[in-house]
Image (tube, rainbow, N blue to C red):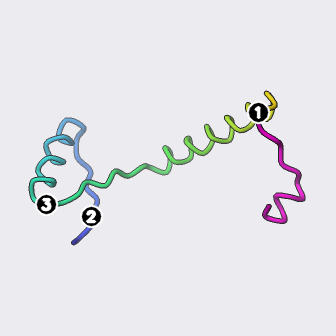
């Protein structure tokens, strides 16, 4: 099976997805670098909030360098 990336207008996404599936293909969603970065930032901020609320333990710098 061959994999390729296509940019299509938002209104054509559903039709194209249905067509690919009809041909026996699979639609693999991708995330942009911006979406991935924002997701990682949100995850980090959530961890900070949990640490401040006492729901999670903070990391020591030595733990980060030691890979713990």
At a point 56% along the width and 46% down the height, the residue shown is: 37
- Residue 67 is one of the magenta-drawn residues: yes
Residue bearing mark 2: 4
At a point 76% along the width and 33% down the height, the residue shown is: 55
Please state which of residues 7 and 23 is positioned toward the viewer in this rendering: 23
- Kindly give the residue lying farthest to the bottom in the view shown: 1
Labels 2 and 3 touching (C-beta < 8 A): no
At a point 14% along the width and 46% down the height, the residue shown is: 18
In the drawing, what numbered circle is on residue 24? Answer: 3
Q: Where 22 sits versus 53, above or below?
A: below
The region drawn magenta spans 55-68
Q: Is residue 18 left or right of residue 45?
A: left
* Mark pair 3, 1: CA separation: 46 Å
Location of residue 22 in the rendering, given as x and y in whole percent from the top left corner:
9, 53
At a point 31% along the width and 55% down the height, the residue shown is: 28
* Mark pair 2, 1: CA separation: 43 Å
- Circle 3 Cα neighbour tier, 10 Å, few/some/many (<14 / 14–19 / ≥20): few
Q: Earlier in the sequence, mark 3 or mark 1?
A: 3
Under circle 2, the secondary element is: loop
Q: How many marks?
A: 3
Under circle 3, the secondary element is: loop
Under circle 1, the secondary element is: loop
Residue bearing mark 1: 55
Location of residue 38 in the rendering, given as x and y in whole percent from the top left corner:
56, 41
Q: Earlier in the sequence, mark 2 or mark 3?
A: 2
Labels 2 and 1 touching (C-beta < 8 A): no
* Mark pair 2, 3: CA separation: 15 Å
Q: Is residue 55 left or right of residue 12?
A: right
Q: Nearer the viewer, mark 2 or mark 3?
A: 3
């Amino acid at each position: 099976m061959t994999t390729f990336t296509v940019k299509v207008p938002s209104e054509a996404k559903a039709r194209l997805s249905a067509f690919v599936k009809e041909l026996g293909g699979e639609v693999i969603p991708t995330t942009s670098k911006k979406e991935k970065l924002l997701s990682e930032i949100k995850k980090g901020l959530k961890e900070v909030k949990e640490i401040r609320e006492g729901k999670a333990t903070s990391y020591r710098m030595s733990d980060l360098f030691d890979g713990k």
